Amino acid sequence: MSDSEPEAMAEADGVPSTKLPPHLELRRTRVLCKVDAPDNTDTIQYSGAYASLGHENSLRFADFCKDFRVDITRISDDDMEFDVVSVDPSIANAFRRILLAELPIMAIENVLIANNTSVVQDEVLAHRLGLIPIKVDPRLFDYLSENDTPNEKNTIVFKLHGSEFLKTYESLTSTSKPETYTSFTCSQDSMPEFAGNPIRVYPDIIISKLGFGQEIELEAHAVKGVGKTHAKWSPVATCWYRMLPEVELMEEIEGEKADVLKQKCAAKVFEIEDLADGKKRATVARPRACTLCRECIRDGEDWEKAYILTLS
Amino acid sequence: MEHTSFGDQRNATFSLAEEDHTLANALRFTLNQDPRVIICGYSIPHPSEARVNVRVQTTGDPAREVLKDACQDLMLMCQHIGGTFNKAVNDSRMKSPPDNDSSQGMDSD
């Protein structure tokens, strides 16, 4: 009756998220990668976007916590690759930007050169020294501003003395000897935080090559900074994200066409599967390897295929 | 800094100094997810100047409250992401000790 209908509607709306019809769900969560251009690239963030359908597009924190997941694909000392599920690209991009530009690290800033008779100019040498990575935890240090005097809490002093004449070299070491021009009241070697993790520099980086009779003697100060100021203070070599490709064949690809398809893909995304009655069929074996080169849909052949990048 | 009219607390433009797309885009996302928000967007008046203008129009609550709530939500989300990530790293470290190959690139999907 006319009374019970509004009630039924109200109950339906009380359910937190009515399911969207499949084409809208596709639009909400996927970016399509078509032959000429990607389609559907905007994320539908607006909370009232599907209001007329009764679907709630706003994000509750509890729902976010429930859906969110991190899967680590590989991890090593130097690099890692991981999947983040159910996060918006704006958040992922914010993390990428922060990793590149806003994480502090120690790098050489001031170089006091006592003697440089090598073929590398002073400023080029200083530039190269600045780019050398230093193995130390930057959280143990403070920033050095213009008004501060350098002390053991905000600067690391390195000494470099290489002489081809004498056929000796001391590689870049954090000094505890009192030979440097700058010395602090308390050396970092004696501080308890560094007891387990001494400050180290990677040993196999070539700074400059010396010919006979050439010598370099200098002292370098490393301070804390962020990548925004200069790229030497960027803690990562690089950092990037992409959306996970999901490849779907819209129709069955069999026989000859399956072979052609498998050949086309340079990333070996497709595999041939043998069916019982002697026919062959193409399947998607490694969607993750897809580089979106669109080689397989380029010729506009009669099969339809859409690559879909998952948003979540 | 907030530019708003005296009587109407619902609509306002917030000018944030020393910020860029990193915060602004993420903030725009969390603002959009709030059901009280009608319109929200951000713009960068000039790329050489580190300043972001965030525009918020709401259904009735004062705009600055909604913005503060969105910032809080963003902080909570990031904390949750950080916690889950740390846990995932520890779990994977326990399962297999890290090996020393040096290739570059971090990839998050």
Image (spheres, rainbow, N blue to C red):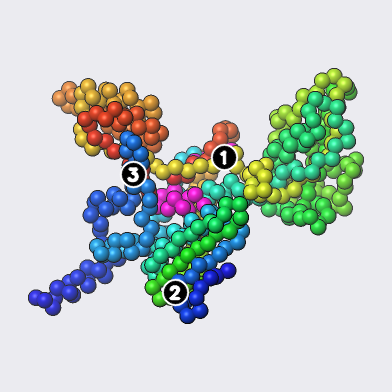
Q: Amino acid at mark 2?
A: Arg
Report crowding for label 1: few under 14, some 14 to 19, many 20 or more residues within 10 A (C-alpha): some
Q: Is residue A139 above or below residue A239?
A: below
Which residue ends up furthest to the bottom in the rendered image?
Answer: B7
Is residue A159 among what the camera can see? Answer: yes
Of all chains, the one bearing label 3 is: A
| Residue marked by disc 1 | A238
Q: Is residue B36 magenta?
A: no
Q: Residue at x 38, y 67 (%)?
A: B38
Q: Residues within 10 Å of mark 3 (few under 14, many from 20)?
A: some
Q: Residue at x 27, y 22 (%)?
A: A259
x 60%, y 61%: residue:
B17
Compute the Cα span from label 3 to label 2: 35 Å
Can residue B72 be seen from the camera position used here? Answer: no
Q: Which mark is residue B10?
A: 2
Q: Give the mark toward the camera: 2 or 1.
A: 2
Residue B74 in the image, given as x and y percentages of width and height = 49, 61
